[in-house]
Image (cartoon, coloured by chain):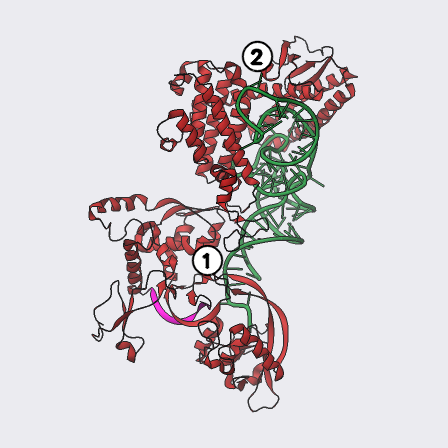
Amino acid sequence: RFTMDEDYSSAVLEVFVRLYEKGLIYQGNYIINWCPRCQTALSDEEAPHRDLQGNLYYLRYPVKDERGAYIVVATTRPETMLGDTAVAVNPRDKRYKKFVGKTLIVPLVDREIKVIADSMVDTKFGTGAVKVTPAHDPNDYALGKKHGLDFISVMRPDGRMNENAKDYADMDRFEAREVILEDLKERGLLEKAEPHALSAGHCYRCHTIIEPYLSKQWFVRMKPLAQPAIEAVKKGKINFYPKRWTKVYLNWMENIQDWCISRQIWWGHRLPVYYCGDCRADDASRGIIVSKTKPDSCPACGSSRITQDEDVLDTWFSSWLWPFATFYWPFGAPDKSADSRSKEELKYFYPTSALVTAPEIIFFWVARMIMAGFEFMGDIPFKDVYIHGTVRDVEGKKMSKSLGNVIDPLTIIKEYGTDALRFSLISITAQGQDVFLSKERFEQGRNFANKIWNASRLVLLNLKEGAVKTDLCEFFKKERLDIVNRWILSRFYSTLKEVRQDIESYRFNEAANALYGFFWHEFCDWYLELIKPSIQEASTQLVMYKVLEKSLRILHPFMPFVTEEIWQKMHATASIMREPCPHVQEQMIDKRLEKQAQSIFSIISQIRNMRSSVEIRPEQKVRVSAFAHSRSKLKLIKENAALISNLARLESLELLDCDERPKATISSVMEDADIYLHFSGLLDAEKESAKFAQKAAQLREYIKTKESRLQNKEFLKKAPQEIVEKETQDLAKSSDELKRLEKMLNELR
RNA sequence: GGGCGAUUGGCUCAGUUGGUUAGAGCGCCACAUUCACAUUGUGGAGAUCAGAGGUUCAAGUCCUCUAUCGCCCACCA
């Protein structure tokens, strides 16, 4: 949808008229943010403050008819002095008591102004006397209204001085500032200039310094609209993720200012406001007609000299209707035959579940959609608001096209691939944290895509015709699978469960990383390597295929292209997009079995470690002896001897029946097994001892903490039972392991 | 002026309600290239979780203060 579509535009005008008739839209002369470059009014949100290093200038305003007497005022914008219509002091400020009510002369324009007293004046700032320019400053405007001062504008819309600035007319505002300072200095009226840090609004589009400018604009009265929107968030009908943005939202809403919605630009929805040429000739407040269509004549005087307001609406004045105006609210679909469908769709999609956006959009759009939602639909527009991080460059600056510090996504796509871009971005965006992006981050995504591709190739190349027709759950129920296949299924469904939970709780990076870890380090590194010798077996065929296929389906939202491509190769038909996300099969998750498999993998790793430490070449096969300290471990090793032999490249695996160190071996002590690797070289007893000594030291340290914890009566009393049990078991296991380590050390001596 | 975030191995960062010996990617060291993948594999080194205090049986995780960096808001004349 496009907000300039005819029906959408109609909704925008309808909203304007409704709010006007309700008294929530009004026209008025106020100080607004004016961009002299774009020559348009801006809302407060479109004029963000940036820090500036300026000067505070101290100017002398002579007292009329009192030779040599003057008041010093401080200002950062001396050029506005030409429009001064008062000087204000605090009524309690003793220094200035005698001046209140006196007349001063504004230098350079020789205007006579009064010294007024107002408690708004801060006695501590500057000199305690402030020049008042009601047409060029919001505070001064309020003072001007309160004290009935004149409003003298000294600038034209283009930021040049106007005829009220007399000698300075036609100068640019900043040029005028310099000349004015020179002239004041010449006359001895510039007392001093001090460096002064300040901040000023800047145009969001062109970064020009905003001029607070007195101008007739249209406004939305926000306070009444804000009320229900505040309530909804406070009551938890709408939730921000991460939660901390709630405070940002509420703070803004509770201090909300009226919204300037008219813009003097040429693109946008024109205001549905018409003026009668005749009424207005006598009275500017008459002859205003707010109507969706152009009236034939003025209802007040009957004149047909009607013209439409030239201004257009703030772009967000159309955007804030998005959640419902996209569904042909309130008039129904242009094609009336589709009208009932459009009504159903509005009902179905409003409110929607989640809005995902950037932090700076909270004020522009999120808050306003919520307000419009309540005002026009009587309900929230969405339940969750997920605020993602901002992408910053290495210096911490927000990446933006206008700053030119962007990494162009198209370049990344060319160099690393689309999936790489997508996956890497997801995986580094921890909940709502800003990301400092550099190109290297995309290598991980690219490598992962490559890994998925190659693993799929391996599976598909080895897949036999008709091997995968069976239903996995049925098969799992009937057949007795080996530990490796049961392990990968358990791990797959554990991962799936985790990924689903992560997505539901808006932890996308956790989901991506869980998938990455599973697919690469479990499916590829262990599972595919383990099954290679038995890849032709029917059960393995089915499991490896199903796990791959289901993995691709979960991976698809993260890496749509590579998964689709592989899917096509697998099925040659429908798109992977049509596939639902797999469901968790709890019956296949077996944590005990996962642990057992893990312990086999550690035996393999330990043997590899020993091989590496005595520099046995990879292709050379070795003899290994093992002693298991528990019956279950013995059984486990026995049953999986082939797997161990294969991945650790063993010539033989001998199971010992006493725990004595065989000759010419190096050893490794594990939780409940000792592993010995036979080798023909010289045993470097010192190196071997050092290894054990270090491990023993660590273990002693560990045991000490466990012991002291278990001796602590408070711990035993207050900690949950399961924690105490766990600690007890850990201590027993570690003590046993330490004993064996020490025995091993003794044997080496 | 107010609010928020960050501070964890050489670098970039995870770490959900406090509870196994704090993880990952990159980088580094050693070894490996017919056998899906060198955009790879195997093994390894590397962290007093910014500092101080506190709560708790138990703190990277909760509280207070401090330091450094960053962001947002503000009618800062």
Which chain is painted in green? Answer: B
Q: Please tell me whether the stretch drawn in magenta is mainly helix, strand or loop.
A: strand
Q: Position of residue A647 (x, y in %)?
A: 59, 17
Look at 71% across and 11% down and name the residue there: A660
Chain where mark 2 sits: A
Relative side of A170 to A75, left or right: left
**Which SS class for mark 2?**
helix
Relative side of A419 to A671, left or right: left
What residue is pinned by disc 1?
A: A252
Mark 1 burial class by Cα count in 10 Å: few <14, some 14-19, many 20+: some
Q: Is A32 contained in the magenta span?
A: yes
| Disc ID at residue A642 | 2
Q: Amino acid at mark 2?
A: Ala
**Which SS class for mark 1?**
helix
Magenta range is: A23-38
Q: Is A562 contained in the magenta span?
A: no
| Disc ID at residue A602 | none
Relative side of A407 to A604, left or right: left
Total number of numbered labels?
2
Q: Where, by quadrant of the figure, is residue A57 drawn?
A: bottom right
Chain where mark 1 sits: A
In this view of the protein, can residue A95 be seen by the observer? Answer: no
Q: Position of residue A623 (x, y in %)?
A: 66, 11
Q: Amino acid at mark 1?
A: Trp
